[in-house]
Amino acid sequence: GPTYEAIDAVRFIGNFSSGKMGFALANTAAKLGAEVFLITGPTSLSIKNNRIKSFHVTSADEMFKISSDLFLQADIAILSAAVSDFRPKKAKKNKIKKERNSNLTIDLVSNVDILKHLGSIKKANQLLIGFALESDNEVDNAIKKIKNKNLDAIVLNSLNDKGAGFNHDTNKVTFINNKNDLTEFKLKTKLEVSEDIFNEIIKLNDE
């Protein structure tokens, strides 16, 4: 799902991610027999499965810290969350008053790139799978992320595909491994997409 980066006591920077893809992946992993750590940002979703242990976070920094800790125990890590790239440099403790700020400027700073950090500490026996949401030069940009972040594969979403991406029950993805092999899938439910993704991950794991 998303992360929320506080502006003041009541406002934040966020995005439209619903978390549905991540929850579908967690369910499919558990169905396949995995012990699952699900790190979720603020969503309306819930999950009940003895194989799934949920960790709730709000900000990108919180997600970074818990992801870094849990990654040390993981055989396979799939990073599907829509983590904010930026956060306000300093959040106000109180609500910003409109009357005093007819024009408001917010200074933003970069959040840690969680996927890149995990790629830098990844061991040979671990698989690291990322997600990329692109709108231009989609495949080229996704392949660059595989190399720059030391990934084993990436799941590409295109903003140009109808019925895919945020706040849909369906998704259309392309799975790209670190050998630049592409597997394109048709528009499907996110649960079906999660099954396709794991079929590809199992192939990687068997290599």
Image (spheres, grey):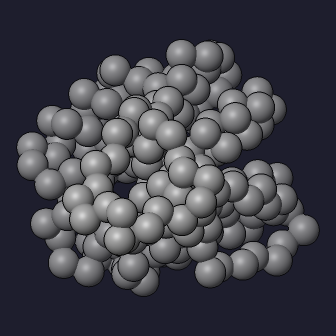
Q: Nearer the viewer, residue 202 or 159?
A: 159
In the image: residue 7, left or right of residue 133: right
Q: Position of residue 176 (x, y in %)?
A: 32, 42
View extreme (left): residue: 137
Q: Is residue 56 in view from this perspective?
A: yes
Q: Position of residue 15 (x, y in %)?
A: 39, 64
Q: Nearer the viewer, residue 36 or 34?
A: 36
- Quarter of image, res 182: top left
Q: Nearer the viewer, residue 77 or 91?
A: 91
191 w.r.t. 72: above or below = below
20 w.r.t. 52: above or below = below
102 w.r.t. 65: above or below = below
16 w.r.t. 2: above or below = below
In the image: residue 133, left or right of residue 110: left
- Quarter of image, res 95: bottom right
Which residue does the image show at 77% across and 56% down from the upper left?
55
Which residue does the image show at 50% across and 30% down from the upper left?
112
Q: Position of residue 204 (x, y in %)?
A: 51, 37
